[in-house]
Amino acid sequence: MKKVLLMFAVAAFATACSNSTETAETTEVTTAVEAGEATVLALSESTVKWTGKKLTGEHFGKINISEGSLFVDGDQLSGGSFTIDMNTITVEDLTDAAQNKDLTDHLFSEDFFNVAQFNAANFEITGVEALAAADEAGNTHTISGNLTIKGITQGISFPAKVANNEAGINASAKFNIDRTLWDIKYKSGKFFPELGDKVISDEIGIELNLAATKS
C-alpha cells in the first residue's frame, strides 16, 4: 500500500511540475538568424533564472549572461544569440551558507552541469513568429532556437513576450526544459524508477529576460 501511495505521489508531482509552466517544444537544430540591425544586450538588465523541483520542495537561483545581441528587422525581433556563464550559477533559496555551498558545488559537478569542462551555455535564435493575438499569459511571439548545454545542442521553441520601442527591444519568457535531453540524468525518475520519493523533476524552469538598447 505504501508503495502504491508513493508511486501516486511521484506521478502527481511529475504532473504538477509539467503543468505549472509550459515545457519548451523540441525542434530540429537549424541555422541561426542574423538578419537586421544588431543591438547589444544590456547585461545588467538581461537575466536567466532557474528553478528545480523535487517531492520535498524546490530550489531556485540565477545564472549570468556574459554577452549577447538581438537582431531587429524593421520593427520586429528577427534573431540573436547570447552566452550564459555557467561559472556564475547561484542558489538563492538557501540562506544557510553550508547548505548553499553544498548545493552550488553539486550543480557545478558532473552530476549536473559539469562546469569544469563546460563553462558556458549558448542560445541562438533560429526563428521568431508573431502570434495572431497575445495568449492568456501575455505572450506575443513564439521563439525557436538552438540551446547548447554541456556541449549538446537541442532545438527548442517557446512562447515569449516581445516589446520593441525607440529605446530598445525586450524579450521575456517562462518555460521548462527537459534536462535529460542535455545528459543531466541525476535522480531522474525516467532513468532511475527505483528512486521513489528521492526523484528530482526532469524539468528545469527557466525565466528569461533579454534587454537590448538601440544605438
Image (spheres, rainbow, N blue to C red):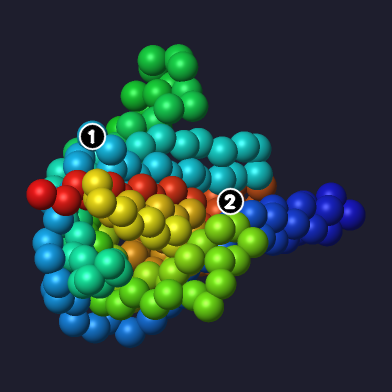
Q: Is residue 143 left or right of residue 168?
A: right
- Nearest the eye: 138 or 115: 138
Quarter occupied by residue 12:
bottom right
Spot occupied by residue 188 in the image (x, y as percentages of width and height): 51, 58
- Report, in whole angstroms, how far the alpha carbon at label 1 lies from the one at label 2: 35 Å
Q: Amino acid at mark 2?
A: Val
Spot occupied by residue 116 in the image (x, y as percentages of width and height): 15, 45
Q: Secondary structure at mark 1?
A: loop
Circle 1 or circle 2, nearest the eye: 1
Q: Which residue is mark 2?
A: 199
- Quarter of the image where the N terminus is located: bottom right
Query: Does 53 sit above or below residue 77?
Result: above
In the picture, the disc for residue 44 is: 1
- Nearest the eye: 202 or 32: 32
Q: Residue at x 23, y 34 (%)?
A: 44
Q: Secondary structure at mark 2?
A: loop
Spot occupied by residue 142 in the image (x, y as percentages of width and height): 43, 72
Q: Residues within 10 Å of mark 2 (few under 14, many from 20)?
A: many
Quarter occupied by residue 85:
top left
Q: Residue at x 21, y 66 (%)?
A: 72
Q: Amino acid at mark 1?
A: Ser
Spot occupied by residue 26 in the image (x, y as percentages of width and height): 42, 77
Q: Residue at x 59, y 66 (%)?
A: 135
Q: Residue at x 56, y 45 (%)?
A: 53
Whether residue 86 is visible here, answered yes or no, is: no
| Among numbered discs 1 and 2, the one appearing first in the sequence | 1
Q: Residues within 10 Å of mark 1 (few under 14, many from 20)?
A: few
Query: Does 156 sit above or below residue 114?
Result: below
